[in-house]
Image (cartoon, helix red, strand yellow):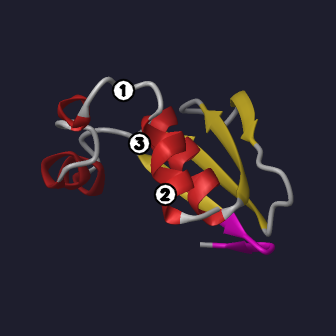
């Protein structure tokens, strides 16, 4: 996917660039890094398209029981990535390695 196609796919529902305010700005990313907010579907969808990866998001409760599982998929994926979210933390599995 070219940069132009990626930007078009990410912003096709927006009327203008002002709709991007606060979406992926520095303040938002600081909140994610600090654990004060969790990345949402838009960020996962954007990462899936940009990297051509299948991304599976699993959510667990406080007892580590699976609450939900959803896979964001792309045609001709180059990699499968699993994100497990519990509380304010993520576990990431890439190529069989837990990061």
Disc 2 to disc 3, C-alpha distance: 23 Å
Q: Position of residue 13 (x, y in %)?
A: 45, 25
Task: Give me the residue at 61% from left, 62% from top.
Answer: 92
Residue 72, by quadrant, is: top right
Q: Secondary structure at mark 3?
A: loop
Q: Position of residue 94 (x, y in %)?
A: 71, 70
Disc number at residue 4?
Answer: 2
How many marks overall? 3
Task: Give me the residue at 25% from left, 53% from top.
Answer: 29
| Other-residue count near label 2 (Cα within 10 Å), few / some / many at <14 / 14–19 / ≥20 | few
* Span of residues in magenta: 93-98
Query: Looking at the image, which is closer to me, 21 or 90?
Result: 21
Earlier in the chain: of badge 2 and badge 3, it is: 2
| Other-residue count near label 1 (Cα within 10 Å), few / some / many at <14 / 14–19 / ≥20 | few
96 inside magenta stretch: yes
Residue 38, by quadrant, is: top left
29 inside magenta stretch: no
Residue 16, by quadrant, is: top left
Q: Is residue 80 above or below residue 42?
A: below
Q: Position of residue 70 (x, y in %)?
A: 73, 33
Q: Which residue is mark 3?
A: 39
Specify whether 9 is left or right of 93. left
Task: Give me the residue at 62% from left, 48% from top.
Answer: 84
Disc 1 to disc 3, C-alpha distance: 19 Å
Residues at badges 1 and 3 in contact (C-beta under 8 Å)? no
Disc number at residue 14?
Answer: 1
- State which mark lies toward you, 2 or 1: 2
């Amino acid at each position: 996917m070219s940069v132009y196609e990626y930007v078009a796919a990410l912003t096709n529902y927006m009327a203008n660039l002002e709709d991007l305010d606060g979406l992926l700005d520095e303040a938002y990313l600081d909140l994610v890094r600090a654990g004060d907010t969790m990345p949402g579907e838009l960020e996962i969808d954007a990462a899936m398209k940009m990297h051509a990866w299948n991304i599976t998001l699993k959510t667990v409760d406080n007892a580590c029981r699976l609450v939900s599982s959803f896979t964001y998929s792309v045609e001709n994926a180059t990699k499968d990535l699993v994100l497990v979210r519990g509380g304010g933390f993520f576990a990431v599995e890439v190529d069989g390695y837990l990061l």
